Amino acid sequence: MSHDHIVHALVSPAWLFPPMLPYDPFARESFQVRVLGELGRGTYSRILHVENLQADAAPKGRSPADLPPSRCFALKRVRIAPNLDRQQAALIEGRIYAEFDVGQRHAHPLVRRYFGHHAVRQDDGTVQHDLLMEVIDAPPPTRVPFPAAETVEILRHLANAAVALHRNGFVHAGLTPRALYLTTLGRPRLGGLADAARIGEVKPLRVAVPGFIAPEIALGTPATTRTTSFLFASLAYVMLLNRFPQAVRLTGRASSQITDAMIGPDAPLHSLVAEVPAALGEFVRQSLVAEPAARPELQELLDTLRWNDAEQRARTHADDEPRAESPLAVQQRSSRNPRLPELRNDYEAHRVTLAGHAFGFRVGRWLGDGAWSRIYLVERPNDGQAFAMKHVIASPTKSRRAHDRLLEEWNRCRQLSHPSLRRLHSLEFVGEDAESAAILGLVMELLDATPLEERAMPRELLVPTLRAVASALAYMHGEGLVHTNLKPRAIFVSELGQAKLAGTGQAVSIGTALERSRVVPGFAAREVVAGRPLSGATDAFAFAATAFNLTTGLIAPEAAQVETKGAPIPPNFIGSDQPLDHFEPMLGEAFGRLAKRALRSKPEDRPTLAELRDALRST
């Protein structure tokens, strides 16, 4: 059977499907998908990255509104061979149904969502199950180190998600680093629902993960909500200390793989890590015991620390209430680079940042600075959805100009809607109206990804990324706007290769001449520096210069010749005078010629972004 299309299902023997289930996946229509790649493998399964070929269609039983905005999904494919032991096959299929059961309940926004279950019997007797799931755009589950304060925040989210599963009658009995996905910015998502068990159910010990096995699971006794307490405590200890707690010795079989050097100190977490609340440290100590009844409930930790989602919502205004509170600026220590874990702690600096709540949002970490603004990760407490907020830095000399620039960005770009262009959601302000307000906050789509300035461009993503950016720019030109600020720093690429164009703060209407602008040498056309009217050809120049840089790591010689106010570009940073297909044949000769034309001095001699985009499509 083709991997690109899942065929319609046939009839199934009744023994495969427990009668308690109210649906028959064999009777459902097949998922029409295109396989983009593989995300991972399990003992009996493969997880595929797929694209929905029915753009406006949802799996049977789900409305399009139930689906995430992306057309991409994760598809878990489990194949059960006809010669597999009957009891083992029944066990595997029971786990499939249990996984789909908990996944489709959508218990918490951090828990991975499931959208459909389809099965098919193939000609050789193999039964194939496909679970259509939300794709999590994050690195593979791993122990990515985050600063202690951020790790505590991750644990807060995780505890709420685990308790939400309890309310729906389930225990996440496989709460391990493999089940925890941390996005580039440290936003947690909880997967691994194949290891969920109903409260009071005996969970089969399929695969032993060293250091993350509750004693009752190892003994084959029923899982309870206090099973989660043990696993959460062990996970917290590992994430904060990168060592295992002494309690791993309670479960013999897998703990034998853990040497003494991998065991951390036998002391309360809050005495070892200053950022850990005492209540969390005490919870970890009390939970890492063999007897489930002696452990505290995870809900007790949420209540003690006021970590409940409801508590977070109570501290802010509802969406339909006026947001009259004034954002407060406080001194806070923020890391230099919040995206790359290995660079987060290379130096610390005091920064003026927003206080914990502003405009009805819960303010998280500082993400970066613009020429006249500061950007934060913010969270909407009523549903936990995260955004980026651009906040004007108020100062006696620059506040009004910064205010006007932010207002202009909102007015020009709020209607833009393109899958590869950062979306603007709302403009928040303190005062009667935005025009007279002293404080503004622009709420934008959160790009939980890395700008290309901070990562090497994988060869296989070069063409898709350039095509996505060219498409977004061509769309802006069709709306009468010029981006004017294209460079690798304005392009964000996620772990799964999705490209987004940001930096619309300097976008202007076609025909506008910039009186003064901050340009990055090597990416700006002459008309930008000279203050002449701008057009789509201005972005074509910057696009070709950016494509040259992403392909070669150097500056295009034509772009290096544009004189700016900054220091000249050193010769060793300037590339050779060759078309791009000379360096990367996969770009194609047609695109190489057009990119070379796009770097010409006269705007009228350059191709359009639509032409550049179409040349990439033909490669």
Image: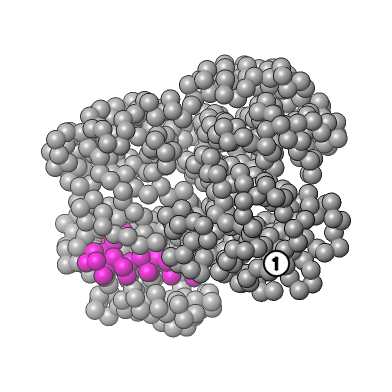
Classify the position of the N terminus by image quarter.
Answer: bottom right
Left or right for 454, reference 19 = left
Left or right for 66, reference 120 = left
Residue 473 position within the rendered picture, expressed as x and y whole percent measured from the top left: 33, 66
- The image shows residue 77, relative to residue 313, as above or below, that is below
The answer to which of 200 and 67 lies nearer the viewer is 200
Q: Is residue 85 in sight in this rendering? A: yes
Residue 190 position within the rendered picture, expressed as x and y whole percent measured from the top left: 58, 42
- Write the residue at 73% across / 70% down: 122
- Write the residue at 37% across / 69% down: 471
* Residue 471 in magenta stretch: yes
- The image shows residue 72, relative to residue 581, as above or below, that is above
Residue 360 location, quadrant: top left
Give the amino acid at mark 1: Val
- Write the residue at 63% across / 70% down: 8
Q: What colouring style does the render use?
A: one colour
Which range of residues does the magenta coloring cover? 462-487
Q: Is residue 517 in sight in this rendering? A: no
The answer to which of 22 and 75 lies nearer the viewer is 22
Q: Residue beneath label 1, please?
A: 11
Residue 95 position within the rendered picture, expressed as x and y whole percent measured from the top left: 72, 48
- Write the residue at 20% across / 53% down: 411
Report helix, strand or loop for mark 1. Answer: loop
* Residue 152 in magenta stretch: no
Q: Mostly what secondary structure, the magenta segment?
A: helix
Residue 292 position within the rendered picture, expressed as x and y whole percent measured from the top left: 73, 22
- Badge 1, how many Cα within 10 Å: few under 14, some, many 20+? few
- The image shows residue 48, relative to residue 285, as above or below, that is below
